[in-house]
Amino acid sequence: MTSEIPSPKIVLTPQELLASFKSAFGDGLKGGEVRSALSGSLKTPRYSIWLRVERALLRPAMQHLITIAYPHLAVIAGNDLGDEIELLYILSVFLGKKHGEYMVTIAISLPKSDLVVPTIADLLPGAVFSEREKQEFFGITVENIPDGRRLFLPDDFPLGVYPWRKDETGIQPGMVKELWKTNRPTDRPAPPVPEKEPAPKESGGSTTESDRSEPLKGGGNL
């Protein structure tokens, strides 16, 4: 029987959560900021915390976040920045808590001469799928990954080719196939586009601009 993860008793503010990382990791925290945006017709503030740590602190940073509130991992995103690969671990915490539910992004950079990163799948089991994806699309080695098989690319896909890389190891022009041209007839005329019928008028008078721009009722998000 799986033990239930306890719900955090205290919901930290975004600033308090950032401060806890600064206190825990000091100079190991290479960057940190709180961003906010207004959401929906009620202009509810939504917060995100952006953190950048050294590669060696990735697992300690995840463990620190887990002690605050067990997070939901949305995805591990990646960017080819030229000399390095950037990984963005995008999570959320305090789900369902009033004034909570913050996005937390933990970023690390890997030099292309050393594309090795430790797994976090033992801490957040769902991470293994994103880790497998980054291995095959960026050529990263995830140490101690519990399942290192390919996830999307077929077994006969060329070794040493990584579709999301922007350098010489990425997809080469000769590999791109314009499948939309395959067996496409060249003598077929373009299908006629039927004219749209006018929309029926509503009974009870015309709709004014102010009627159309009335905000959604019930506080729903746009």
Image: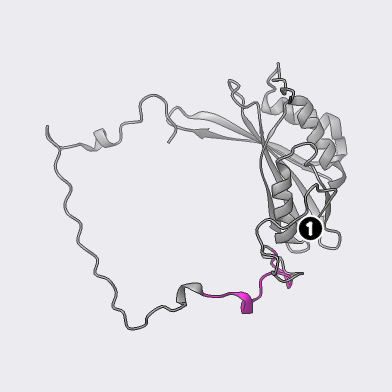
Q: Residue at x 79, y 36 (%)?
A: 123
| Magenta stretch secondary structure, dominant | loop
Identify the residue position indicated by label 1 in the image: 140
The quarter of the picture where residue 150 lies is bottom right
Looking at the picture, does residue 167 appear above or below residue 102? below
- Residue at the top extreme of this rendering: 9
Q: Residue at x 68, y 20 (%)?
A: 11
Question: Magenta segment: does it hold 151?
Answer: no
Looking at the picture, does residue 163 appear above or below residue 87? below
| Quarter the C terminus occupies | top left
The quarter of the picture where residue 64 lies is top right
Q: Which amino acid type corresponds to the residue marked 1 in the rendered image?
A: Ile
Tag 1: Cα neighbours inside 10 Å, few (<14), some, or many (≥20)? many
Looking at the picture, does residue 174 appear above or below residue 42? below
Locate residue 50, reporting x and y percent.
Answer: 70, 39
Q: Which residues are magenta?
A: 165-178
Q: Residue at x 66, y 75 (%)?
A: 172
Relative to 193, 116 lies left or right: right
